[in-house]
Each structure stands twice: as structure tokens, then as C-alpha cells.
């Protein structure tokens, strides 16, 4: 059944993203960017999978969905810049907000991690929490377990507990994108995350 109060609140959130300018368009299929052209790390070094997706999907608001995808794509790619500059090999994987099958998303994420040999996942998300009246930008780092060291036959990698979180919150109103630019914010948050990621590794 329709939820008028939610729809009205979501339209306010969508309006903030409609104010976004300069974000690159995102395809509706997963977008994967390799590490080779944007990383100065030594060949064969374990990569970081930079996984991005928004949260605010509404099947009746395709234009708003596109804007959330654009904002999250810009945010994710901007986080990549300081990581690559710090010498980390980075693989970008961005899903559209319409990809709501969580088990399938996790399966695809693990398959990409295993194929690329990434030992950490850095999740990027830019989304509206309408209940709290906030626009939230969040980075979370997870270790990938089961890739390094001896492995049992047929074993699969798995995602460990959150090892690092960085979150910034902004009041959700019609002027929020005057204060928040996903590309600029991504670079700033990426610089802070890079300092944590390039520290001593286990």
C-alpha cells in the first residue's frame, strides 16, 4: 500500500539530490573499474575493493533513483583518488539502488573479491535517513577472510567484522547539496580512510 508520509519525505530527500550538478551518469548494471590505471602499487599487491551503493530505492521514482546512483557513483570514484595516490590498488564496484537482492549482491561481491584477490572491502554509501532527517555519507572497511594462508579445498572467502568506520551527517533539507558535493566529500573522506588503510597490515 502507498505510504504518503514516506513518499513525501522521500521526495524531499530526492529533491536534494536533484540539486546535484556535475556527477557522472551511472549505468544500471554494476560498474567495475580496475586498479591498473589509477594505482602506483606494486603488481600483485592485495587490492582494496571499493564497493558502493545507495539505499534510497523507490520503484515509482526512476528519476530520483538515477540521481542517487549518480551521487553514489561520484562519491565512490572520488574516494578512490586518495587511496590510489597512497599506492593502494583499488577496484571500484558500484551497484545501482535498484539492486535490492542482498544475497545476490553479497554473492557477486565475494566473487569479485576472489577473482581479484582483494583482502579488504571499503564500502561507500551516500543516502538519506528520512526518519532522522539526515543525509549520511559513510565509509566502512571490512577484512576479507580466507584468502591468505593455507586454504581448505572448496573454501570460499568471507567478509569479516567492520574494522573501520567514518561517517558524516548533514541535515536533510532542500539546501543540503549546496553544502555537500559528493565528489569533494569523497576525496576528503578518502584521504582520512587512506591514512588508516596504509597502516601496518597483518
Image: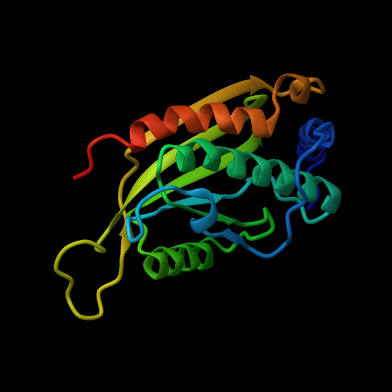
Whole-percent x and y of residue 142?
36, 46
Name the residue: 16% across, 63% down: 149
Q: How many marks?
A: 0
In this view, the residue in front, 135 or 51, is: 51
- Residue 116 coordinates in the image, percent (x, y): 41, 65
Q: Is residue 23 visible?
A: yes
9 shown above or below 77: above
Residue 131 visible here: no
Tell me the quadrant of the picture where the C terminus can be found.
top left
In front of the other: 24 or 180: 24
Chosen colour scheme: rainbow
Spot the residue most to the left.
150
Displayed quadrant of residue 111? bottom left
At 51% from the left and 51% from the top, the residue drawn is 51
Which residue shows up at 43% across the image and 32% down it? 193
The quadrant in which residue 113 appears is bottom left
> Farthest residue toward the bottom?
153
Percent coordinates x, y for residue 156 in the rendering: 30, 71
The quarter of the picture where residue 55 lies is: top right
Residue 112 spot, x, y in % from top left = 45, 66
> In this rendering, is residue 106 above or below 89?
below
Give left or right: position of 87 versus 176: left
**Left or right of 133: which side holds 116?**
left
Judge from the rendering whether residue 156 lies leftward or rightward of residue 52; answer left or right. Answer: left
Amino acid at each position: 500500500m502507498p505510504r504518503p508520509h514516506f513518499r513525501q519525505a522521500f521526495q524531499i530527500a530526492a529533491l536534494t539530490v536533484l540539486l546535484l550538478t556535475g556527477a557522472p551518469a551511472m549505468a544500471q548494471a554494476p560498474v567495475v573499474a580496475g586498479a591498473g590505471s589509477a594505482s602506483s602499487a606494486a603488481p600483485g599487491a592485495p587490492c582494496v575493493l571499493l564497493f558502493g551503493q545507495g539505499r534510497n530505492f523507490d520503484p515509482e521514482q526512476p528519476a530520483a533513483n538515477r540521481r542517487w546512483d549518480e551521487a553514489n557513483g561520484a562519491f565512490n570514484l572520488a574516494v578512490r583518488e586518495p587511496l590510489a595516490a597512497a599506492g593502494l590498488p583499488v577496484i571500484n564496484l558500484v551497484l545501482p539502488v535498484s539492486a535490492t537482492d542482498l544475497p545476490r549482491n553479497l554473492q557477486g561481491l565475494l566473487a569479485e573479491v576472489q577473482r581479484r584477490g582483494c583482502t579488504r572491502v571499503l564500502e561507500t554509501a551516500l543516502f538519506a535517513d528520512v526518519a532522522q532527517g539526515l543525509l549520511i555519507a559513510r565509509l566502512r572497511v571490512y577484512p576479507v577472510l580466507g584468502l591468505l594462508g593455507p586454504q581448505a579445498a572448496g573454501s570460499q572467502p568471507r567478509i569479516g567484522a567492520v574494522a573501520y568506520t567514518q561517517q558524516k551527517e548533514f541535515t536533510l533539507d532542500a539546501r543540503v547539496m549546496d553544502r555537500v558535493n559528493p565528489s569533494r566529500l569523497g576525496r576528503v573522506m578518502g584521504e582520512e580512510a587512506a591514512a588508516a588503510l596504509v597502516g601496518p597490515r597483518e
